[in-house]
């Protein structure tokens, strides 16, 4: 048996303290240069189990790269239900953006932000942060140096509901999200969106598209919703066994991508509650995830199919792709 070629591209997520002064409790923390084979991005994922300060530990931060803050529902059956109210201060004006649905907050490089706080807590939820650089760095601005808050709407477009077809001016879901011609996913997913901008792949199975192992609910945002970042990302809830796609087996992207498998239970973060098989490379090497893991896909790297082998409880899946859209040509329809 020949040795596997792509074992180095499949890694367990590391549960640990984040950079000094950033997070208040341990979480999954992965840097591109150190932990993901030079991937040109870094990310953190954590669970929220109560009210209070979320990050940073004090004051504000400013990064020399674009940053995306994602606050995501983990309650199965309503992916937009955040289960709490979250407030984020943006800019030296300390303009407060507040929301209670799954949300993305795009922070362009050189823009300060902070005092991310949770209130009105009803149930657990998740958050992940995407830093568009292979190494994390930040300028910390302590509370003692912050200016007094100045109300306004300068940063109104920076936060938006985490869903398909968000109005650029209001940040709210367009009424007929499922009828928009543009398909940023490159795979037909955005045609499956309901009036809330939530996609339902399992309700739309077919011989040329979605398979039985795909998502129950899926939300996906693209660069034109994220201050034109070179980034698109999705968050999905899954419960079923089987192949995820029937329209093809493997595909590629012109830009780097990571695939992340996670559990939804904040009290059991090291357990996905399922096992997923995913193929890597043109050699169709098969790898398996039953603990939180990341699959690293370089530019133009063949990957998939994904097949859920068994499921004990709902689990989550994240894609982080370093392009504003998600060009996804199938190699073998």
Image (cartoon, helix red, strand yellow):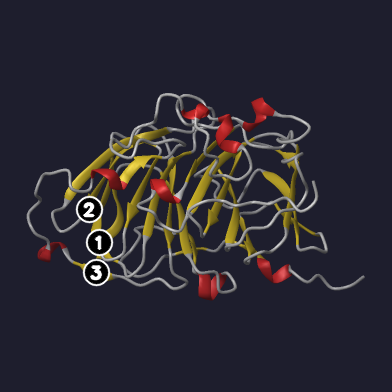
Question: Residue 197: where, in percent of width, then height?
Answer: 47, 31
- Identify the element where label 2 is drawn: strand
- Identify the element where label 3 is drawn: strand
Residue 269 is left or right of residue 247, and the answer is: left
The mark lying in front, picked from 3 and 1, is: 1
* 258 or 11, nearer to the observer: 258
Question: Residue 196: where, in percent of width, then height?
Answer: 45, 27
Give the distance between the C-alpha atoms of the residues marked 3 and 1, in whole angstroms.
12 Å
Estimate how packed mark 3 is, as few (under 14), some (14 to 19) or many (20 or more) residues with alpha carbons within 10 Å: some
Residue 326 is left or right of residue 43, and the answer is: right
As drawn, the label of residue 90 is: 2
Estimate how packed mark 1 is, as few (under 14), some (14 to 19) or many (20 or more) residues with alpha carbons within 10 Å: some
Task: Say which label, 1 or 2, has the lower sequence index.
Answer: 2
Question: Residue 248: where, in percent of width, then height?
Answer: 77, 45
Question: Residue 259: where, in percent of width, then height?
Answer: 61, 55
Report the residue marked by disc 3: 140
Rendered position, 13 above or below 117: below
Determine the residue positioned at 55% across, 47% down: 268
Determine the residue positioned at 11% across, 66% down: 145
- Identify the element where label 1 is drawn: loop
As drawn, the label of residue 135 is: none
User: Do the CB atoms of the residues marked 1 and 2 lie less than 8 Å apart?
Assistant: yes
**Residue 152: quarter of image:** top left
Determine the residue positioned at 47% across, 29% down: 177
């Amino acid at each position: 048996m020949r040795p596997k070629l792509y074992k180095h591209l499949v890694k367990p997520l590391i549960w640990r303290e984040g950079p000094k002064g950033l997070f208040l409790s341990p979480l999954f923390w992965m840097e591109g240069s150190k932990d993901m084979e030079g991937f040109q991005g870094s990310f953190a994922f954590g669970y929220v189990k109560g009210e209070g300060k979320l990050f940073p530990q004090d004051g504000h931060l400013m990064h020399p790269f674009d940053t995306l803050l994602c606050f995501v529902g983990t309650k199965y059956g309503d992916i937009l239900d955040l289960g709490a109210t979250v407030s984020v201060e943006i800019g030296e004006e300390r303009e407060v953006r507040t929301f209670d649905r799954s949300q993305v907050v795009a922070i362009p490089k050189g823009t300060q932000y902070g005092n991310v706080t949770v209130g009105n807590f009803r149930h657990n939820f998740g958050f992940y942060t995407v830093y568009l650089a292979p190494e994390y760095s930040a300028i910390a601005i302590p509370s003692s140096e912050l200016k007094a808050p100045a109300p306004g709407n300068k940063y109104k477009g920076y936060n938006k509901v985490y869903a398909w077809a968000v109005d650029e001016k209001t940040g709210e879901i367009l009424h007929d999200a499922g009828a928009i011609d543009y398909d940023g996913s490159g795979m037909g997913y955005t045609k499956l969106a309901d009036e809330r901008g939530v996609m339902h792949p399992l309700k739309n199975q077919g011989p040329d598209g979605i398979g039985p192992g795909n998502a129950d609910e899926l939300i996906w945002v693209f660069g034109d919703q994220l201050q034109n970042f070179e980034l698109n990302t999705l968050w999905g809830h899954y419960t079923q066994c089987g192949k995820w796609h029937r329209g093809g087996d493997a595909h590629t992207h012109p830009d780097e991508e990571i695939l992340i498998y996670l559990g939804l239970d904040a009290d059991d973060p090291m357990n996905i509650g399922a096992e997923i098989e995913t193929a890597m490379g043109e050699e169709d090497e098969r790898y398996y995830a039953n603990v939180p893991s990341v699959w690293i896909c370089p530019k133009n790297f063949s990957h998939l199919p994904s097949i859920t082998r068994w499921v004990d409880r709902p689990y989550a899946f994240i894609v982080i792709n370093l392009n504003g859209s998600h060009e996804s040509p199938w190699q073998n329809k």
